[in-house]
Amino acid sequence: MRTKGGPRRERSTPWVELVHAADRATLDAVADLLVAAASRGEALGLSPTITREQYDHHLERLMASAQRRDAALAVARTPGGAVVGTAQWTRSAYPTRRVLGELDHVVVSPSARGTGAGRALIEAVVTDARAAGIEVLMLEARGNNHGALALYERNGFRSVGNLPNVVAIGSARHDIVLMARKLTRPPDTDLLGHLPAGAGASLPRGVSQGPDWQRTERLLLCLPTTDVADAYFAIHGDPATNVHNPAGTMVDPAMAIPILESWQRHWCEAGYGYWVVRAPEDGRVLGFGGVRPPLPDEDFLNLYYRFRPAAWGKGYATELGRAALALAAKSSPGAPVVALIRPRNEPSIRVVQRLGMRFEGEVERQLGVYLKYEIVPEP
C-alpha cells in the first residue's frame, strides 16, 4: 500500500513462457484463471457456469494439438511463479487453411492488469504461431469489449469484419468483431484473394468481369497491386525478356513497388492502365501489359506487354492487346494507341500487325531508334 506522500511502488511485469507440454500444476492454475474470469462475466465465449473439469478437457485437447505444433499455451507468471495470465493459439482444422491460426482465451487476472502482461502474452503467441508456419492470426472479440479491442489494435490486429448481434447474453445481443494480424508469408506466395483463379474458382453464367479483373478467352487481367512486386522483378529482371531493351534488365527489386504504385494511380485517375496478367487455372502471373494514359509530353496511349518466357509463343500478347485496345476505345475514344518497338524485335512487330496497327515510321528516343505503330481503336 502506498502511504500519503510516499513513493509509488511499481508492480513487476510478469514473465511469459510458451507451454507445449504443461505440468499438471500449470494446467490447473490456467483452468482456475479461466473459470474465475468466466464466472465474472468476462467476454471469453465461455459459460459463466463452466467448471474446472470442463475446462480441463479443453486444455487436454489443446496440449495434444500443441504436441503436433498445431497450438500453444502462453502463461504469464509473477516473479514468484504464480500464474496471472494466459493466452492460446490453435491452427485451423481445415486442411486448406493450415496457415490460419486463432488467438483465443486471453485473460489477465485483475491484480496483474496494467503491468504489460496482456501485450507480452499476445506477442509470445504471435512469435510461436509464426514459427509454426501460421501466416495470419485471427481472433473474435465481443463488440462491447472495447478495452480488449484497443489492446489487440495496439498489438497489430486490424478489424476485418463484423457479425452483428450474434452473441446472446440473456436477452441482450452483441456483435462479434473479427480481427486479424498478418505474420510472415513464404517469398513465393501468390496472393490471389478474391480473384476467380485457381482451384475451386467459378463464375456466374454470363459474367466475365469484376470490379478489378476481367476474363478473356484464356487470360485473367487484373488491376495492379504491390503484392506482385516479386513477379514483376522476376520478369523484368530476366535477361531473356530484355534482349531488345536498350536499358537492360531491372537490377533493383525495390523499384518494382513504386512502378506498380504508379500503375495503380493510372487506374484511379484515368480509369484504365496496365494489367497484371494471370493464368485462370492456377492464378500464376504470366506477365504484364495493357494501355496506359499519356505522359505529360505524349499525345497517345502507350501499348505495352511483357510475358515470362514460358508464356511465349501461345498468342497471349495478341489476346492481351485486343482487350487493351477495346478498353482504350471505351475509356478514351478517339485517342491514338501507339506501340514503340525496337527494329529487331520481330515477335512484337508481328503482334502489333495482328492487332491491325499501322507502321508510322521511325522515331528517335533517348535510348535509340524505335519503330512506331499506331491505331485509333474503334468502339
Image (cartoon, helix red, strand yellow):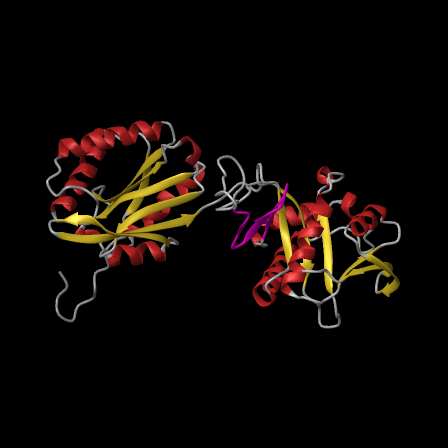
Whole-percent x, y for residue 239 in the image: 78, 45
The answer to if 81 sits in the magenta stretch is no
Front-most of residues 317 and 42: 317
Residue at 48 percent across and 35 percent down: it is 200
Q: Is residue 307 visible?
A: no
Residue at 51 percent across and 55 percent down: it is 211
Quarter placement of the C terminus: bottom right
Q: Is residue 351 visible?
A: yes
155 left or right, relative to 223: left
Q: How many marks?
A: 0
Whole-percent x, y for residue 101 in the image: 37, 40
179 left or right, relative to 326: left
The answer to if 219 sits in the magenta stretch is yes
In the rendered image, the vertical position of residue 241 relative to residue 27, given as above or below:
below
Residue at 44 percent across and 38 percent down: it is 99
Q: Quadrant of residue 278?
A: top right
Front-most of residues 171 and 133: 171
Whole-percent x, y for residue 225 in the image: 57, 54
Whole-percent x, y for residue 203 in the image: 50, 42
Quarter placement of the N terminus: bottom left
Front-most of residues 52 and 366: 366
In the rendered image, the vertical position of residue 44 relative to residue 259, given as above or below:
above
Front-most of residues 98 and 286: 286
73 left or right, relative to 264: left
Which residues are drawn in magenta? 207-222
